[in-house]
């Protein structure tokens, strides 16, 4: 396919030319699954030969796009130890959503961003990764979402996976000219304004500041169309003092930390009081009930996930203990055992974004099965806390 060319400064509306102090910035808005956007990006960089090319990627996403075998370097044990399984799941869900649309549109998501980097490297132009670390974005978004709306967010993401609606040619033609992921985030933003602030508004500020600080007087910046208006608005402002704030991962709520320690302390004190007031037999009965109410649902969750027998046994043994400590959950212990006993192959990492869209795929793919183990054993242990806690409190006040 021949790359289009344009007379100097006669680009389509997808290109905004911004004069800022001594800098000229050509802001190119793209759809992440559009061949037209890919061609436009290559054309602009080829014709302008800027001093730097800025792209809407962070190091992690750039490595995922440019290094097809990057999965070989992922240490799942470290992911579990750092409690980043949930982040990895969300990344896979978003990747699967874009990939599904990309297959129908004939262009893989992020092609235009990778093309921008490759074109710049071919011409010897420095590439600037100007987006915020995706892990920071996801953690800040989760923290900004209220407890009740977290469930809505999870359901919306999962629903996007299993939506089998086939797009007709008219819808496909419309989507080729849109930034599909930004459209999804925009819809979420209407229902979850605080989440949108993190996913869109904060990143607009971050990218604008990174673009302004890039080397050279003539720059090309390639960003999703959903960020165009926001960046144009904030790039003329001085927001560099906000960078430390919007790149910080919020600490866990002090209230949740207190609750995390308060629940096990109350359970232990309640058992002691039951023993003192009602005798050792009642103490033993309630302690055994606590163990069984956690061990059985967690082991059942591991069994439903078709986990390794060692993982199932670990679920039964770990859940009653981890339920009395907020430092680690049964799900993380079981996920680690599952990784050790049934490590996924590189091929399964590569196929995860496809398998994640089918119910069967969650059990067939060893990586996704680790996620299942994590989710189901966590749910089982949480259920045990309610069941066991209710029994102990009822006994104490009976």
Image (cartoon, rainbow, N blue to C red):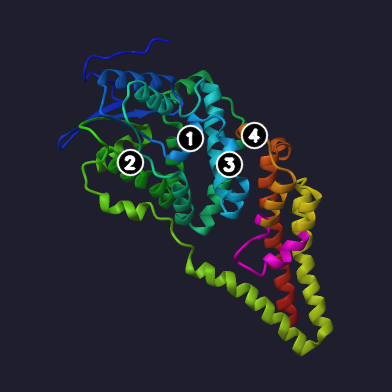
Residues under labels 2 and 1: Cα distance?
Answer: 19 Å
Say whether residue 156 is visible. no
Q: Determine crowd level at label 1: few under 14, some 14-19, many 20+ residues with C-alpha closer than 10 A.
A: few
Which mark is on residue 346?
4
User: Could you say which disc has been placed on residue 63 in the image?
Assistant: 1
Task: Tell me what residue is drawn at x 57 percent, y 39 percent.
Answer: 73
Q: Secondary structure at mark 1?
A: helix
Using the numbered discs, state the Cα–Cα distance from disc 2 to disc 3 in whole angstroms: 27 Å
Q: Label 1 near label 2: C-beta < 8 Å?
A: no
| Cα distance between the residues tagged 1 and 4 | 16 Å
User: Residue 81: x and y, percent?
Assistant: 60, 54
Check disc 4 and report its element: helix, strand or loop: helix
Residue at image mark 3:
74
Q: Using the rendered view, name the quadrant where residue 70 is placed.
A: top right
- Few, some or many C-alpha atoms within 10 Å of disc 3 (few <14, some 14-19, many ≥20)? few
Q: Which residues are magenta?
A: 316-332
Q: Quadrant of residue 47?
A: top left
The residues tagged by marks 3 and 4 sit, at their Cα atoms, a distance apart of 10 Å
Task: Single out the residue that lies furthest toward the top.
Answer: 2
Is 214 placed left or right of 276 in the picture?
left
């Amino acid at each position: 396919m021949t790359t289009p060319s344009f007379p100097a400064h006669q680009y389509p509306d997808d290109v905004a030319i911004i004069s800022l102090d001594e800098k000229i910035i050509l802001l190119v808005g793209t759809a992440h699954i559009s061949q037209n956007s890919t061609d436009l990006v290559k054309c602009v960089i080829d014709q302008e030969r800027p001093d730097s090319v800025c792209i809407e990627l962070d190091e992690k996403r750039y490595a995922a796009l440019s290094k097809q075998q990057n999965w070989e370097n992922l240490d799942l044990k470290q992911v579990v130890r750092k409690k980043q399984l949930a982040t990895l799941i969300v990344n896979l869900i978003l990747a699967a959503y874009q990939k599904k649309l990309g297959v129908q549109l004939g262009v893989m998501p992020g092609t235009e961003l990778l093309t921008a980097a490759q074109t710049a490297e071919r011409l010897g132009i420095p590439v600037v990764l100007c987006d915020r670390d995706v892990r920071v974005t996801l953690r800040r978004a989760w923290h900004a979402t209220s407890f009740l709306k977290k469930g809505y967010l999870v359901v919306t993401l999962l629903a996007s996976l299993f939506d089998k609606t086939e797009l007709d040619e008219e819808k496909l033609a419309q989507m080729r000219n849109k930034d599909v992921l930004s459209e999804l985030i925009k819809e979420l933003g209407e229902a979850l304004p605080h989440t949108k602030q993190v996913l869109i508004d904060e990143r607009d500020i971050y990218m604008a500041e990174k673009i302004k600080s890039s080397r050279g007087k003539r720059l090309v910046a390639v960003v999703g169309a959903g960020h165009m208006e926001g960046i144009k608005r904030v790039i003329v402002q001085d927001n560099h003092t906000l960078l430390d704030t919007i790149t910080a991962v919020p600490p866990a709520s002090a209230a949740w930390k207190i609750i995390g320690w308060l629940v096990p302390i109350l359970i232990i004190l309640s058992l002691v009081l039951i023993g003192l007031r009602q005798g050792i037999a009642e103490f033993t009965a309630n302690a055994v009930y606590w163990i069984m109410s956690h061990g059985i649902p967690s082991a059942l969750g591991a069994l439903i996930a078709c986990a390794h027998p060692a993982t199932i046994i670990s679920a039964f043994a770990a859940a009653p203990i981890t339920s009395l400590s907020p430092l680690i959950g049964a799900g993380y212990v079981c996920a680690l055992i599952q990784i050790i006993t049934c490590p996924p192959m590189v091929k399964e990492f590569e196929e995860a974004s496809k398998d994640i869209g089918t119910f069967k795929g969650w059990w067939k793919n060893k990586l996704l099965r680790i996620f299942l183990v994590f989710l189901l054993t966590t749910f089982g242990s949480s259920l045990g806390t309610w069941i066991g806690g209710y029994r102990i409190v009822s006994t104490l006040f009976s």
